[in-house]
Image (cartoon, rainbow, N blue to C red):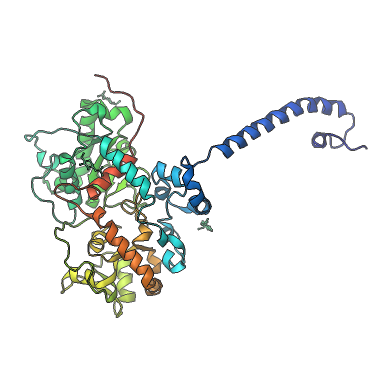
Amino acid sequence: MPQSPFPWRSFSSSSSSSSSSANWFRGFFFIPTCLALNTFLFILFYISSTSTPNPFPSQIPTHFSYSSSRLVSSRNLSITTLRVSQKVSLRNGNGGPPLSLHQTQPSSPLPSFGRGNHEQAEGVFHDEELFLEDYKEMNKSFKIYVYPHKRSDPFARSLLPEDFEPNGNYASESYFKKSLIKSHFITNNPKEADFFFLPFSITGLRNDRRVSVSGIPNFIRDYIFDVSHKYPYWNRTGGADHFYVACHSVGRSAMDKSSEAKSSIVQVVCSSSYFLTGYISHKDAALPQIWPRKEDPPNLVSSKRTRLAFFAGAMNSPTRQELVRVWGKDSEIFAHSGRLKTPYADELLKSKFCLHVKGFEVNTARVGDSIFYGCVPVIIANYYDLPFGDILNWKSFSVVVTTSDIPRLKEILKGINDEEYAILQSNVLKVRRHFKWHSSPVDYDTFHMVMYQLWLRRTSVRLPLMD
Ligand SMILES: *[C@@H]1O[C@H](CO)[C@@H](O)[C@H](O)[C@H]1NC(C)=O
Ligand SMILES: *[C@@H]1O[C@H](CO)[C@@H](O)[C@H](O)[C@H]1NC(C)=O
Ligand SMILES: *[C@@H]1O[C@H](CO)[C@@H](O)[C@H](O)[C@H]1NC(C)=O
């Protein structure tokens, strides 16, 4: 049999010669189909080779090889790290560092420093230039509408900003509302609002006898019912351009009786764990839990950090128990069960690393504490969606390990040499301003960082509001 000049025929004419005319007939259709397919593939190829994912070509030469390797590893990242501001990922193509890599892979090797990759060469931001540029834009144009309440409202205490200085473990919630109301982001014109703030205070409701912890979900359900019936704003997006802020972990169940709202509203909360049902990492935002502090410690920079690592706290989780079991008697890692007799601040100032160990919740005020006192935080809390992870490169100023790394903690921390430590610590000092509230908000402080996170989550296309 002569070899067919049309090799594709062999697909259809495997044996029978009587079918050769039918094959010819099929080929008759096959040729144009193939041509069409080729053209289509060519066009696809053309489009993909000419439209670079990087709209800022000047960045290609420096980032290209780097980002292509990152693109591969980013497959294993959690949703949140992938969601790093859409513009960030467009621009530098690397989608941010694998923030939670060590959290999600229990048998991780040493963290980046120990492994000697060049993470430390990067700054404290995923992309500083982009952040500063975006921030300016946000600062100029971002507008928030707050649902109004009268002083005479029976729940005014929980709905209006508190008139006292925020205090205690959950101060972040109260600071946010006070800062927002004073800020230039407020608008009285809902038509120009990017976001609508539901001003209920979870801490306030929790302390209100008429509501208390068990009544919060009902309160919120009724509140959302009222807002969505009285005003036209909610229905436009099903609540997607609405947000609330809570630091106490009971805020997580606030939406339990408003399931539709829960899946759309942006929850800005301290207890931001990937594995808690209340928190949806690609939609919600982590709020840092920060103990209010005024004066900077006088010896912040000069303090001699002679101790390798420090932890003290209640034994309210298996992780903490494990830490104290393994390191409780160690001379270099100080792991203390319960309250200290010495001042807490002194310990934070004389330690190189300060351990943030998950308790009941993944979050505690310890991350903010260690940053305030210039101590490099070590995050031992699996599945913690770290605050400002969209913006800050946590690997440049902290060490993130899994709870299963506890036995290797000393090895990991000692694997960080003096030079690497100096970089980590100077970066801690650089990010300090982002983990601080002020009575009157200051650029780049916690309030503005939260605003920026919200801005990244804004919805750009919505139905216009009717008069
Ligand atoms: C992703 O994770 C899997 C399993 O955890 C691992 O085998 C694989 O090498 C990882 N891929 C990358 C690119 O890191
Ligand atoms: C942000 O806006 C405020 C108020 O307009 C202004 O005073 C401040 O300088 C702005 N900050 C930046 C970084 O643009
Ligand atoms: C919003 O939608 C709900 C449910 O469909 C409806 O009952 C309510 O009246 C709507 N609100 C407004 C202000 O139209």
Relative image position of residue 381 (x, y in whole percent):
34, 61
Q: Is residue 150 left or right of residue 42?
A: left
* Residue that appears at 40% across and 56% down: 99
Number of numbered callouts drawn: 0
The quarter of the image holding the C terminus is top left
The quarter of the image holding the N terminus is top right
* Furthest-left residue in this view: 152
Relative image position of residue 32 (x, y in whole percent):
73, 26
Residue 337 visible at all = no
Residue 227 visible at all = yes
Q: Quadrant of residue 345?
A: bottom left
* Residue that appears at 79% across and 25% down: 28
Q: Is residue 359 left or right of residue 65?
A: left
* Furthest-top residue in this view: 467
Residue nearest the viewer, comparing 165 with 402 = 165
Relative image position of residue 222 (x, y in whole percent):
21, 34
Q: Up-down: is 422 above or below 290?
A: below
Residue nearest the viewer, comparing 258 with 181 = 181
Relative image position of residue 361 (x, y in whole percent):
28, 57
